[in-house]
Each structure stands twice: as structure tokens, then as C-alpha cells.
Amino acid sequence: MSSVLITGASSGFGQACARRFAAAGKPLVLCARRADRLEALADELAGQTAVHWVALDVRDRDAVYALPGALPPAFAEVSVLVNNAGLALGLGGADVADINHWETMVDTNIKGLMYLTQAMLPGMVARGGGHVVNIGSVAASWPYPGGNVYGGTKAFVQQFSRNLRADLLGKNIRVSNVEPGMCETEFSVVRFAGDADRASQVYAGMAPLRGEDIAEIVFWVTALPSHINVNQLEVMPLAQAWGPFAVHRD
């Protein structure tokens, strides 16, 4: 039976996606760096579906490319890949940002997604079908102060997703880019280096999206009839929209 592989499955969107696909009885391959969290999640979902978990850093190219051949036979036929692993670090302007933060975002959000995609695509092509779901961000299209490299990485995800569609035309493989807006997960806690109080202020006085909301969207996109491809889906909480142009005045 085909499986669903989810990266960044130890928290946030990835964890919520794991729970949603498990509720539908889909066998899962869960990947993340934090083995203790993966093990706990696998134990939680064991009564609903078969789960195989792998402690994996998507920045480790050799480990990623070894993954398909290391999966147990019951999980080896991955039909859905959810490229969720990613992060934002810092909110400083480009003139003061930490270059190490920038490199970590590029290595995770861009390179990690590339590695996983290319590692899993040959199997999908050989089996004649599959679905790659990339988790992007509204930051791919709509800039904001301090978004700099994070927005740039998500713009890559957007364009890479489109080009995958072009490359895979006729091979029965769907590609979807889901782009969330403000969503309260561990995202801002990570961005602010564990400062939960500062992170909570991002969502003060408004109703943000939840991880479960995005998981429902990801599941819906993959559950549509096979002749339908959702290319790109941008979603914001009702409380979020666009502002007027910023103008600096002397």
C-alpha cells in the first residue's frame, strides 16, 4: 500500500498533517530532527494507521538520498510527499541580519526541499503516479520588513513548484504549493529563538490560522480526483490582509 511521507513532522503543520492523514488510515513515513517527538507521535497514531519514523535533517543530502532505499517494503511506495520542513529565523533588516540565519533558511527551505523532491521523484515516476505538496508561504508573493531571505526562500518554492509541473507533464504526478499566511504554531517561537512571549504578540488580538487548518487543506488537495491538480493555493486568516504602500517621508 502506498504511503505519505511528511517532513518536519515533529511539530506545526507537519504534525497536524500526520494526524489528518492518519485519521484517513494512510500509512505514514514521518521525518524530522527530533526523534523523541517523532516516537511520541508515532505511538499516538499507531492505533489509526501504520507509522514508520526517521530522524532526519533535510539539510543532510546524503541521508536524504539514502532514504528511499532504506524504507521498509510496507512504506517504500511513497505516493504523497509533503515537503513541510522549513523555518524563519530573525526579523531584522538585511543590513543587520545574521548571515548564519540566512544560510540556515536557504539550506533548509530550499536545499532540503530540493533534496527530498529529487530523492522521491524517481520512484513516483517509475510507479506511474504521485503527488508532491510543497508548503510555501504568502511571503513568497508579499514582502514585509524583516522577511528578506525567508520570503526569498518561499519565492523559490513557488517557482520550483511551477517548474516541477512543467517537467512532470505527462508523468501522472501532481504538484501543489500551499501558501499559508499567519498561523500560530511553533513558527514564531523558532523565529524569535524560543522567546514565547514575543512570539505570542504576533497573534495578539486576532484569530490566526491553526496547523489543523493547513492540514485539512493539504489533505483535501491530495484527495481530489486524480485528473485535478491544484497548482497553488494561498490562504490567510480572515483577520489578515494587505495594507497600503509604504512611503518614507523626510
Image (cartoon, rainbow, N blue to C red):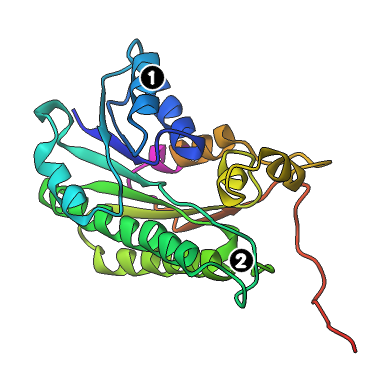
Residue corresponding to mark 2:
147
- The residue lying toward the viewer, choosing from 111 and 159, is 111
Q: Quadrant of residue 138?
A: bottom right
Circle 1 Cα neighbour tier, 10 Å, few/some/many (<14 / 14–19 / ≥20): few
Q: Residue 3 in magenta?
A: no
Left or right side of 94 for 217? left
Circle 2 Cα neighbour tier, 10 Å, few/some/many (<14 / 14–19 / ≥20): many
Q: Amino acid at mark 1?
A: Ala
Give me the residue at 80% from left, 76% from top.
245
- The residue lying toward the viewer, choosing from 63 and 159, is 63
Badge 2 element: loop
Badge 1 element: helix
Whether label 2 touches label 1, CB < 8 Å: no
Q: Residue 222 in magenta?
A: yes
- Kindly give the residue lying farthest to the bottom in the view shown: 250
- The spot of residue 18 in percent (x, y) is 40, 30
- The spot of residue 92 in percent (x, y) is 65, 66
- Kindly give the residue lying farthest to the top in the view shown: 47
Left or right side of 169 for 95? right
Task: Give the mark nearer the N terminus: 2 vs 1.
Answer: 1
Rounded to the nearest angstrom, the CA distance separating label 2 from label 1 is: 33 Å
- The spot of residue 201 in percent (x, y) is 76, 44
Task: Tell me the quarter of the image containing the C terminus.
Answer: bottom right
Q: Is residue 48 above or below residue 117?
A: above
Give me the residue at 30% from left, 69% from top.
166
The stretch in magenta equals 220-228
Give me the residue at 52% from left, 40% from top.
217
Residue corresponding to mark 1:
40
Q: Amino acid at mark 2?
A: Gly
Q: Is residue 168 above or below residue 44?
A: below
